[in-house]
């Protein structure tokens, strides 16, 4: 059963993808179905090139003029200076993102050599490559940020973590489908809006108004994601119209909805998102915390749903994947625990931020924020391994022969 519906907007809609795959495998001028998803990591590469320019400018400015420690929000109770690099521990702990990110990209490259079917879902690797590079870029930009943590360069620390979490959910949804659920232009526009709101979140004068655009953006996005998955990629007007038609039908003639499993999963996701948004609003959490919380919970729900559907369709789940799943849970729980133990806060005054400073907790060198770096990187790496090998039992099956959920 096609869980996306039949009425949707398609990329390459003038091409017969099935005939392309079967009759023109040697024609490199005609795009195969999985070429659609390669646009994600290509655009990510372009964005990162432009994004690194101000980061390098900021880095050179610091090197040439010496860092003004009074403008930086450091953990003064746990820092190490190496070659005039203050708080070297916070900078160096980010290298684990690069190491594990490159290892994962190598695993993807090597493992695809064992796949013989050119129409396997494992050729749909454009988004998973984007995930690997997002992890690497998180390490690069987070290192630059920690040279002098402040409001000025805060976006360097969070952008690619946000992109990684969003890409993970997208990959899980897109995995078994040939067709785009979300086009790459909309995805990167959404990332940009989140980054703008994340930076504005630091301004105290906007503290009473920040929740208005945040709530609107996240609710509208949640609606669009729901309709894209359940109804297919429609225009905004058609999405609203089709949603109203379905609600009217269910109200007048109550019956079990089509695609019941995905319907229930979407209801759960929306309830979790709205509840989390209300709780975070009430407790006045920072947007970066909200996004981490919501995306991690959403991805966890989607993974659990995915595993349930594999059991339901009697597909094989290897013991290695079960072990990975059992390791992922405590790793992310621990990492989020250490994330909630801040050693500084850019939105406060320096005097208020210094009160959050805490002593080193690991090897008399690393603080709790460094442990967040280590555990989150390990959690990201384990999560990538898990979702990449989750369907290894189907690696040589055609995408047309497997169930879509």
Image (tube, rainbow, N blue to C red):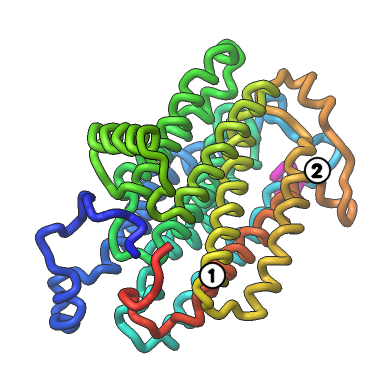
Q: Give whichever of 292, 350 is nearer the camera.
A: 292
According to the picture, the residue beneath numbered tag 2 turns out to be 79
| Residue at image location 54% in from the left, 67% down from the top | 387
The overriding secondary structure of the stretch rendered in magenta is: loop
Q: Nearer the viewer, mark 2 or mark 1?
A: 1
Q: How many marks?
A: 2
Tell me where the magenta segment starts and ends, as one range. Answer: 81-87
Q: Residues within 10 Å of mark 2 (few under 14, many from 20)?
A: many
Quarter of the C terminus within the rendering: bottom left
- Residue 344 in the figure: left or right of residue 383: right
Residue ID for mark 1 = 312
The alpha-carbon separation of the residues under discs 2 and 1 comes to 52 Å
**Circles 2 and 1 in contact, beta carbons < 8 Å:** no
Q: Nearer the viewer, residue 352 or 332?
A: 332
Q: Position of residue 162 (x, y in %)?
A: 53, 44
Instruction: Give me the residue at 41% from left, 55% from top.
Output: 259
Residue sitting nearer the eye, 227 or 24: 227
């Amino acid at each position: 059963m096609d869980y996306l519906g039949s009425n949707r907007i398609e990329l390459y809609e003038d091409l017969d993808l099935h005939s392309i795959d079967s009759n023109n495998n040697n024609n490199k001028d005609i795009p195969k179905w999985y070429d659609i998803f390669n646009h994600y990591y290509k655009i990510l590469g372009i964005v990162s090139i432009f994004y690194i320019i101000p980061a390098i400018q900021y880095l050179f400015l610091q090197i040439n003029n010496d860092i003004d420690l009074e403008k930086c929000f450091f953990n003064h109770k746990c820092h190490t200076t190496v070659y005039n690099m203050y708080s070297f521990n916070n900078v160096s702990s980010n290298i684990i993102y690069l190491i594990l990110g490159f290892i994962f990209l190598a695993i993807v490259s090597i493992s695809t050599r064992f796949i013989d079917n050119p129409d396997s879902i494992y050729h749909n690797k454009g988004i998973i490559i984007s995930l690997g590079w997002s992890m690497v870029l998180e390490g690069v930009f987070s290192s630059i940020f920690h040279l002098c943590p402040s409001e000025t360069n805060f976006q360097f620390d969070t952008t690619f973590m946000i992109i990684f979490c969003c890409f993970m959910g997208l990959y899980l949804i897109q995995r078994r489908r040939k067709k785009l659920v979300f086009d790459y232009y909309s995805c990167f526009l959404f990332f940009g809006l989140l980054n703008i709101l994340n930076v504005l979140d630091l301004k105290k004068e906007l503290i009473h108004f920040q929740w208005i655009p945040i709530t609107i953006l996240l609710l509208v996005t949640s609606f669009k994601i729901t309709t894209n998955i359940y109804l297919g990629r429609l225009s905004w007007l058609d999405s609203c119209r089709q949603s109203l038609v379905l609600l009217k039908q269910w109200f007048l003639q109550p019956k079990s909805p089509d695609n019941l499993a995905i319907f229930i999963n979407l209801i759960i996701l929306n309830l979790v998102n709205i509840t989390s948004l209300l709780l975070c609003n009430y407790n006045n959490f920072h947007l970066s915390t909200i996004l981490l919380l919501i995306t991690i919970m959403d991805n966890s729900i989607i993974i659990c749903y995915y595993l349930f559907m594999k059991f339901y369709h009697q597909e094989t789940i290897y013991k290695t994947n079960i072990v990975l799943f059992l390791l992922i849970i405590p790793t992310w729980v621990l990492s989020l625990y250490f994330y909630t133990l801040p050693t500084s806060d850019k939105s406060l005054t320096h005097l208020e931020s210094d009160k959050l400073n805490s002593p080193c907790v690991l090897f008399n060198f690393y603080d709790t924020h460094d442990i967040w770096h280590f555990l989150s990187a390990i959690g990201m790496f384990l999560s990538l391994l898990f979702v990449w090998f989750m369907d290894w039992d189907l690696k040589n099956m055609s995408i047309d022969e497997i169930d879509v959920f």
